[in-house]
Amino acid sequence: MAAPEESTREGVEPAVRVSTLELFFDLVFVFTITQLTDDLAHELRWEQVGEVLLMLAIIWWMYSGYAWLTNAVAPTSTTRRTLLLAGMAGFLIIALAIPEAFHDNGWAFGTGYLIVNLVHSALFLRAAGPAVGRAAATLAPLNLLSAALVFVGGLLPEDQRFAWWGASLFVQGATPYLHRLRGFTINAGHFVERHGLVMIIVIGESIVSIGLGFAGVDLDFASIVVALLGLSVAYYFWWGYFSADEERSAVALAAISDPRRRAQMALGAWGYAHYPMIFGIVLFSAGIKKTIPYAFDPLDWPTAAALAVGAATFLVGHAIFLALLRLRGVPHRLIAAGLVLLTIFIGRLDATGQLVTILAIMSISMIIEDLPQIVRSRSTDLGSFGR
């Protein structure tokens, strides 16, 4: 979770821009996304999807915790940077353990997660000012309780692991209501930029998946077509998220003057709503990786579903994000998501046909959304030229 509000008298150092160390931290975190994608691509089945959903949820919670922390407590000292490095080590252990987290490597996943939480609490408590102590009195114990459940679950037999890790997720879900986000502040510009950077890296993961999908596959016209279509869909992930919405969302968040309401909005829009967006990209990436060898062939149900449900989940997540911030574009994304889901049946006939249809739906919805703004912009330019 987050770092507390501190006044300038309490030594807060508000970070205006994301530091390179934070970006380095994000790169290590995104390795967990790579591993989750590979885990799904290895075997697309309901049990595997459930495991990835759960692991991503508890991992995303603590990534958000670090994003909130560095939003208020910049990693400017050697001690803070060293602790942040230790947190990165914890995320690396988590990532390495993901492929066998529900089997032989549960202990490693739990250990890495406990390290991540202990470091977060240590950074939390080292920040200057009484506001930190008051916030840590309820927040750190709740985070450590969830980490303890993950750690113990990792040591127990495999058939008990899902229940223990699910209990950890329940504690995380209850934390904002038990803590009530009192005493927290958000530097809107830094917060939005930090999440934007991690999203562009996650979208880039879909490109990596295309490359990995070529392992053992001949580079021919058919496979190149699939790769280019996957790249194009990833481009519309970028367009959907970044085309002016990043700037508008920063303005909307900054416009909330009440610190508690701003923190609640940050949790809802950048915490909860970003989770389905990231999972959607992971699921689509797993699908595109498995699609590479079957360019003009029918796909099996799991692969066709991964492509369609992945893209649709991203669109729904972003629609929720925009709705929370009361920004335009919600109907466009929801309608596009519904249409994209129907492409599963096209994929059962032809993989390329499904990708072309997904691309057409996303591009048309984005263009229609931006068309009024383009027309207004051109009208303004023409009016200025006439004067």
Image: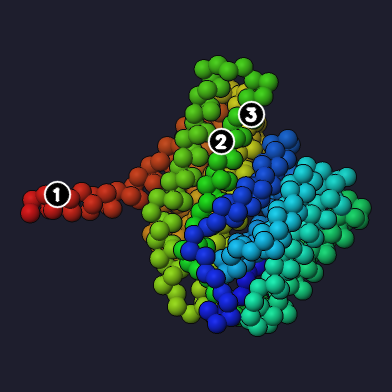
Q: x and y percent of residue 56 in the render?
A: 69, 53
Tell which circle, 3 or 2, labels the residue nearer the N-terminal end. Answer: 2
**Quadrant of res 164:** bottom right
Residue that extends furthest to the right in the rendered view of this protein: 157
Q: CA distance from mark 3 to mark 1?
A: 48 Å
Identify the residue at horizontal 62%, vertical 71% (top origin): 3
**According to the image, label 2 marks what residue?**
207
**320 or 189: which is nearer to us?**
189
Tell which circle, 3 or 1, labels the residue nearer the N-terminal end. Answer: 3
Rendered image: mark on residue 382: 1
Identify the residue at horizontal 41%, vertical 56% (top origin): 245
Q: x and y percent of residue 40 in the render?
A: 70, 40
Identify the residue at horizontal 17%, vertical 50% (top origin): 381
In which quadrant will I find the N terminus? bottom right
Graded by Cα atoms within 10 Å as few (under 14), some (14 to 19) or many (20 or more), the crowding at tag 2 reads many
Residue that extends furthest to the left in the rendered view of this protein: 387
Graded by Cα atoms within 10 Å as few (under 14), some (14 to 19) or many (20 or more), the crowding at tag 3 reads many
**119 or 151: which is nearer to us?**
119
Q: CA distance from mark 3 to mark 2?
A: 10 Å
Residue 14 left/right relative to 305? left
Q: Amino acid at mark 2?
A: Ile
Q: Please, what secondary structure does the residue beneath circle 3 have?
A: loop
Identify whether 2 is placed above or below 280: below
Q: x and y percent of residue 358 in the render?
A: 48, 38
Q: Could you tell me if residue 312 is visible in this image?
A: no
Rendered image: mark on residue 242: none
Q: Amino acid at mark 3?
A: Gly
Identify the residue at horizontal 52%, vertical 38% (top origin): 343
Q: Please, what secondary structure does the residue beneath circle 1 have?
A: helix
